[in-house]
Image (spheres, rainbow, N blue to C red):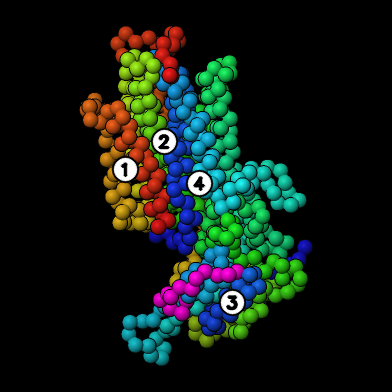
Amino acid sequence: MAEHFVQPPHWEWYIVSYFFLAGLAGGSYTLATMLRLWGSPRDEGTARMAFLVAFPLVVVCGIFLTIDLGQPLRFWHMLINTTPGVGGVNFKYWSPISIGSWALLIFGVFSFVSFLETLGYLRPIGRVNEIIGSIVALFLASYTGVVLSVSNQPVWSDSYAIGGLFVASALSASAALLSWLSTYRSDAASAEPTEQRLETADGYFVVLELLMIAAFFMTLSTAGTIGRMLSGPWLILWILVLVSLIPPLLSLAGRRTTALSGIGSAVVVLVGVFLLRFVVIFGAQF
Amino acid sequence: MPEPVGFFTDTSICIGCKACEVACKEWNQLPGNTPKFLDSFDNTGQLDAENWRHVKFIDLVPEAPIVAGNGSAWLLMADICKHCTHASCMEVCPTDAIIKTEYNTIYIQQDACNGCRDCISACPYGAIGFNERTGTVGKCTMCYDRLQADMTPACAKACPTQSIQYGTLTELHQKADARLATLKAQGYEKAELYGRDDSVYGGLGAFFLLMDKPEVYGLPNAANAGLPSRNNFGGYVNAFIVAALGVFAGMVAFRKRSPGEPDAGAPATGGAR
């Protein structure tokens, strides 16, 4: 059994919210790019919605991350070295939180460009911009899990699977969000095939998420810290997380029911993904 | 460049007087937390931003009555930041606020730290805490200001039994080896030096003579003394594979068409309101 004597960093609501919204921003941007690459022309409205959503979300991400700092006005110290006589930029490739700070900034630029492009304030730059932006977006959605693993905190440092778990769940939440938002398109009547494609994709993402949940628990079991994740209220939350995976799985199996489709399904998935981050972050600390 | 310095804390002669805690707070102007009534003589609880030295009272009182020769009832240890050669806190710190000084000690620059607290989850000794007053993290500086004035750190100066000794690491290693040999000769087979060699975090600037296994004192043994970066490879590879599978799954899902639906490349028909 792994032995840890670490104190909790007290990463709480702001960080849970940041991890959740970073996943949604990155996931939405990636799905928009994928819809443009491989989707039907009917998906364009949803792709545009996704680009419009990604940038505001990433702005909120930056706000949450900043106000969680003990010294919010020093947020830029993440990027610039203020040690006297050293100076220059701070970039530590071996520290995920350092790379993540840059990823958030860079993704902010890409999502802002796509946002302006979608609103018509910029001429279309082309797919290359979106593809590179999506790579950064996927990093943003996943590095938050790697930050947790790259520590000595019990549970977090016992598993390599949190990054994968977070990116799979981020894609799932984003697919659910976009499927729901598609119902508000000006051409909502022709959006149904898009919704179906997103629901199918969500089903696949949820399968990946289930595999990652299994990998997470297997790694904790090996380290001897699984009991901590399944004790007290955390067990109930894990059950709720698993329940939230049911609508996309039913949809994938072709058993979509009225009660579990549309906004109902989206809300269940989004709440489940938020709870997943909550239980992973809080469960290891308290 | 000064010779590397450090602390040798000999737990076998600690009497739990907490003079070190008081001296540290006095010199470093730490107000301290509200005292807690804990399950021993400990009323500070742990190392954190207000407690840079903390005397641990490890209760080993056996169920059976204590008689001569059936072991010690308490282990005492004046715990502190270990000033690791390979420091986990310094490794993850994104602002580079945590630096190694000219004395080979680990120091947190208060004006550079922005309070992200990643170092707290990295420190395997729980030596760093968040300071609500300053919005930054804090821990032992080994009295950096005193070192610059060629003075002994406050805790070592105040320790009445010389359980805490300060000096150059070369000199302290010699003292520790001699003390261990003495204890072994007296029959204390469990006695061992912790952090004297490079088996934990490349060697510790603040190392200990322990009277039991490290884990009894709440210290990771050599097998468990890992740097956070050990999980970089697995974490990123896992995330990359899942992201790639996610993109593939998206491609499969998005290429599906309803009957009569146009393929990509045809003019777009919809839009966001």
* Residues tagged 1 and 3 counted as in contact (Cβ below 8 A): no
The residue drawn where x is 47% and y is 76% is B42
Look at mark 3 in the image and give the residue it sits on.
B22
Q: Which mark is residue A198?
A: none
Q: Mark 4 Cα within 10 Å, few/some/many (few <14, many 20+)?
A: many
Q: Give the camera-side residue of B35 and B150.
A: B35
Q: Secondary structure at mark 3?
A: helix
Earlier-in-chain disc, 2 versus 1: 2
Q: Which mark is residue A147?
A: 4
* Residues tagged 3 and 2 counted as in contact (Cβ below 8 A): no
User: Considering the image in quadrants, where does the C terminus of chain B appear?
Assistant: top left
The residue drawn where x is 44% and y is 34% is A24
Q: CA distance from mark 1 to mark 4?
A: 22 Å
Q: CA distance from mark 2 to mark 1?
A: 13 Å
Disc 1 or disc 3, which is closer to the eye?
Answer: 3
Q: Give the camera-side residue of A217 and A231.
A: A231
Q: Which mark is residue A170?
A: 2
- Same chain? Circles 4 and 2: yes
Relative height, residue B8 to residue A30 (above, below): below
Q: Main secondary structure of the magenta part?
A: loop
Identify the subunit bearing mark 3. B
Disc 4 or disc 3, which is closer to the eye?
Answer: 3
Earlier-in-chain disc, 4 versus 2: 4
Query: Which amino acid type is marked by label 2?
Result: Ala
Q: Mark 1 Cα within 10 Å, few/some/many (few <14, many 20+)?
A: many
Q: Position of residue B89 (x, y in %)?
A: 57, 56
Look at mark 1 in the image and give the residue it sits on.
A241
Magenta segment, which residues? Answer: B30-42
- Same chain? Circles 4 and 3: no
Disc 1 or disc 4, which is closer to the eye?
Answer: 1
